[in-house]
Image (cartoon, rainbow, N blue to C red):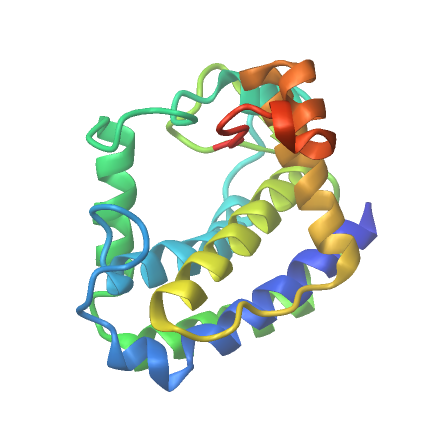
Amino acid sequence: MAQIRELYLSAAASAAKLLAAPQVAAAWHEPSALAKLSVRGLAGHLAGQIFFIPKVLAEPVPTEKVIPLHKYYALVSWIGSDLDDPFNVLIRTSGEQDAADGPAALAARVEATVRELRAVLPTAPSRAVRRPTWGAWSISLDDFVTSRLLEVAVHCDDLAYSVGVPAPELPAQAIETVVDVLSRIAIRRHGATNVLRALSRAERAPASISAL
């Protein structure tokens, strides 16, 4: 799975460039395109998807059972949850905290972290990883990297749209990987027929097949 790590690193570098854009700093205190989240908070949340990787690499290998990526998405509680759900509130407060020192400091920290990851992630041994908010399970490092690739891709688009700049052009294989994961989540949430119709028959497609 070395390829997924390279795809993630490419996306993380694009995120670093976006976070350093002057348009982000100019809109820092404005509302973002996401409800109840400022540009500052969104930038911090995007940056967090890069900070997560060195965090999990530094933690002890968990003993909880390893589950596949798609089961992970079936188990997490935040998909489709209310904006005021405690987990979503934590996302907003964590994003604000990561961005507390301002746009220049956040961009510099992200750039430094991407440099660090370029040195360590490609050769990091395969292992299980786990976040404290999860249940009694873990996932593989490469599946975690895939999940962070999804978050980087989605939130790069959110942030770019929020500040009026084009979304970064990520590698085609990165987008294909993200769309594959999102489509599987959408099938589970909305049913295979609804997803099929949304992709092929606009006249009878459901109003939404949003994965998240």
* Residue 64 in sight in this render: no
For residue 183, above or below residue 9: above
162 with respect to 172 (left or right): left
In the rendered image, which quarter is residue 5 located in?
bottom right
Q: Nearer the viewer, residue 42 or 167?
A: 167
Q: Nearer the viewer, residue 192 or 205?
A: 205
In the rendered image, which quarter is residue 63 located in?
top right
- How many tags in the picture? 0
93 with respect to 157 (left or right): left
Q: Residue at x 62, y 14 (%)?
A: 191
Q: Locate residue 122, reporting x and y percent.
A: 75, 59
Q: Nearer the viewer, residue 157 or 124?
A: 157
Q: Locate residue 90, reporting x and y percent.
A: 25, 39
161 with respect to 71 (left or right): left
128 with respect to 94 (left or right): right
For residue 54, above or below residue 170: above
